[in-house]
Image (cartoon, grey):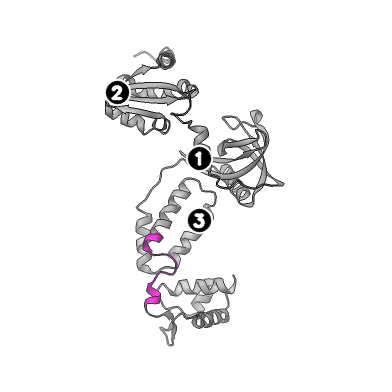
Amino acid sequence: MSKADNMLSILWMLRSGKKMTAQQLADELEIHVRTVYRCIDSLCASGVPIIADSGPNGGFQILGTFADSPLMFDAEEQKALVHASVFAQEAGYPHTDALGRAVDKLKRYTNEKQLTQIERHSSGLSVLQPPIDSEQKGRLQCLEEAAGQRQTLRMVYGGSNGDSGTGSVREFDPYSIIHWKGQWYTTGYCHLRKDLRNFRVDRIVSLDLTDRRFERPENFSAKDVLLEQLLPDPAGDPSLVTVRIQAHDHVLNELKQHWLLGHALIERSPGEAVYRLDSTSLHSYVPYFLLPYGKALTIAEPESLVLRMAEVSRGIAEHYGSMLSGLPSE
């Protein structure tokens, strides 16, 4: 480590309020004891009130309010950083190792009272998130690094199951990675389609750096691009289909919490909700979401959705009915 790093580390350790000898500091930092003395001389010269006590129980310590005041973050900021690290790690943040080291350093170089509070708050928060595998984490690291370095990637993008046999090869300028609804996406310029595109990271087969560089447009928002492509404007798109659902208000309130139906809601009255949805989602995805509500709701329009619900219901009934012939009779 550099001298500045050693000085900062010594300062953090002495802020704990405990006396530490030069040898203890040297052993902790794996440096020579003479280096410790030089760093302490520099800290004292910069105004840090370090005193040295001689004798069997002697050592260095910091005086007064300097030791009690936070070096970088107050208690609320420390709590927020620890909580943010829990969310990031569970979401599959690509630099979890570095994040863990940063949190460990925060805990290590704080006083006992602050450490107790940090441990209490960190254990008081849990996040349930499906884990991502090491390959996907590696792709996230590659995408994030390329976005920061403004470097074009050669990407093989697979089908819905990440199958390279149905994938396509393209050059891609990664502007950002984004986490949404439990999935990681990357947003940027696709040279194959000559336009901005979103790609699910779990469907990327491979990534390779190229020698090409790019400039990200000013005021670019990955969030806006992702939502614009996934969720069309329910009020401004004439190609969308009007869907009218009648149900008890508690059912309609649950439907409102759904990411797609909540966005597509354009009108709500007691016992009825009106949505505007694209026909693809309406006939492929929406029926399977509405099916668990059974007789608790009525589809007033469109008729095509009612027919599709009946078709899906028959298919499910036939699927489970076919199992009965293979079951042993009682």
Q: Which mark is residue 224?
A: 1
If the image is split into quadrants, where does the N terminus sit? Answer: bottom right
The picture places residue 130, in percent across and down from the top left corner, at 46, 40
The location of residue 91, given as percent across then percent down, is: 47, 45
Q: Residue at x 27, y 26 (%)?
A: 270
Residue 30 visible to an observer of this rendering: no
Along the line of sight, the residue nearer the viewer: 276 or 162: 276
Mark 2 → mark 3, Cα distance in angstroms = 47 Å
Instruction: Give the camera-side residue of 207 and 242.
Output: 242
Q: Nearer the viewer, mark 1 or mark 3?
A: 1
Residue type, numbered disc 2: Ala
> Is residue 123 placed above or below 45 in the rendered structure?
above
Residue shown at the point (65%, 42%) measured from the top left: 207
| Numbered disc 3: secondary structure | helix
Real-space Cα distance between discs 1 and 3? 27 Å
Q: Which mark is residue 247?
A: 2
Going by the numbered disc 3, the residue's amino acid type is Leu
Residue 262 versus residue 47: which sits nearer the camera? 262
Label 2 sits on a secondary structure element that is strand
**Residue under numbered circle 3:** 99
The residues colored magenta run 65-78
The mark that comes first in sequence, 1 or 3, is 3
C-beta proximity under 8 Å, tags 1 and 3: no
Q: CA distance from mark 2 to mark 1?
A: 32 Å
